[in-house]
Image: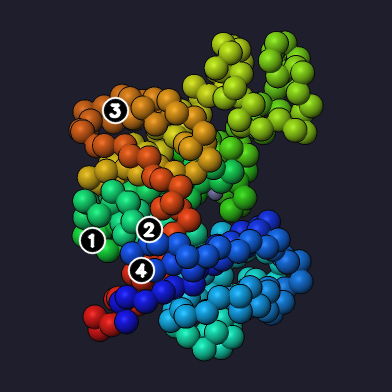
Amino acid sequence: MSGGYSLGFDVGGTKITAVLASSEGRIKKRVEAKTRRFKGAADLINQIHSLGMQFNNFDKVGVIFPAPISRKGVALYAPNLSGWKNANIKEMLGRAFQRDVFIDNDATAQTISVKIYDKGRKYRNFIYLAVGTGIGGGVFVNNEIYRGGNGYAGEFGHSVILANGPVCGCGRRGCVEALASGRAISRRAAENSKEIRNSPFLSSIRLENLSAEDIFSGRELGDPFCTLLIDETIYYLSVAIANYINEFDPEAIFLGGGLIKNNESLISELKESVENELGNYTREVPFIKVSGRTVDLSPIALSVYESSKNSDG
Ligand SMILES: [Zn+2]
């Protein structure tokens, strides 16, 4: 059963991507659709199932969601999908597909994919951090994904690095996601209207369209306000990553997500800043960028990893 094909779904707030791939990670077919996100869980289950009907010859299904998912397959909270809180997605999809269905948080599945399809295979203990619109992650401990007591471990984005800082989507204040994610970078910029007016680069962009990528582009052109914002972002991320290194002592840090993908120099800048931040605890920890293929294969990796664990007993 460890061979064969898996059908994987990446269910995002805006689109669903379905891929059929072999357990070695060869993608055979891919389909995309706009997520029907406002009609509740049963409707979205139907959408996922009918997308799946376009594929055949698969023996297991992996599904990933941008939400914390319990070990039983229940969403603790689903910020971008209505009617999903407390829905037992695993059970509903299992009934629809009549096959083994494995579901998890997207960042947890990406961490598993780093282990199975990327350089993570060289390490028993590593941390994966996705820095994009939000910040997520996961951790391998002693060669196994670490899920914690309920399945919610690895919420690295909700590590508070500034007590009483800005309010985060999770309800706390000063999480690294509320300070250094793509969304947070554009919000921090927009809060400084005077600096924006004085910035030769940003003053030409409409505030509501301002993206983190604009701030990075402004820095490339030497804009002082953009440079300050990115320097602060690197500092915030370094504080968080230094905490994770002190807490987990990983052999490597893997980085993915839009900000890492689109900004070539960011990973080496982060590494240097983390080394400073670690103080007397500085040690050599490689920082490794994950490939786009690793992210694409994450629902496949989830199903391959979980089904092999089940067959091992
Ligand atoms: Zn938070």
Query: Which residue is the site of mark 4?
Result: 23
Type of the residue with mark 2: Ser
Tell me the tag on residue 113. 2
Q: Nearer the viewer, residue 287 or 292?
A: 292
Label 3 near ligand 1 (CB < 8 Å): no
Type of the residue with mark 4: Ser
Question: Alpha carbon of mark 2 to alpha carbon of mark 1: how far?
Answer: 13 Å
- Residue 136 locus on image (x, y percent): 48, 50
Question: Alpha carbon of mark 4 to alpha carbon of mark 1: how far?
Answer: 19 Å
Q: Is residue 254 visible?
A: yes
Q: Nearer the viewer, mark 4 or mark 1?
A: 4
Query: Which residue is the site of mark 1?
Result: 143
Q: Nearer the viewer, mark 3 or mark 4?
A: 4
The answer to which of marks 4 and 1 sits earlier in the sequence is: 4
Counting other residues with Cα less than 10 Å from the Cα at mark 2, is it few (<14), some (14-19), or many (20 or more)? Answer: many
Tell me the tag on residue 275. 3
The answer to which of marks 2 and 1 sits earlier in the sequence is: 2
Label 2 near ligand 1 (CB < 8 Å): no
Counting other residues with Cα less than 10 Å from the Cα at mark 4, is it few (<14), some (14-19), or many (20 or more)? Answer: many
- Residue 223 locus on image (x, y percent): 61, 12
Question: Alpha carbon of mark 3 to alpha carbon of mark 4: how far?
Answer: 37 Å
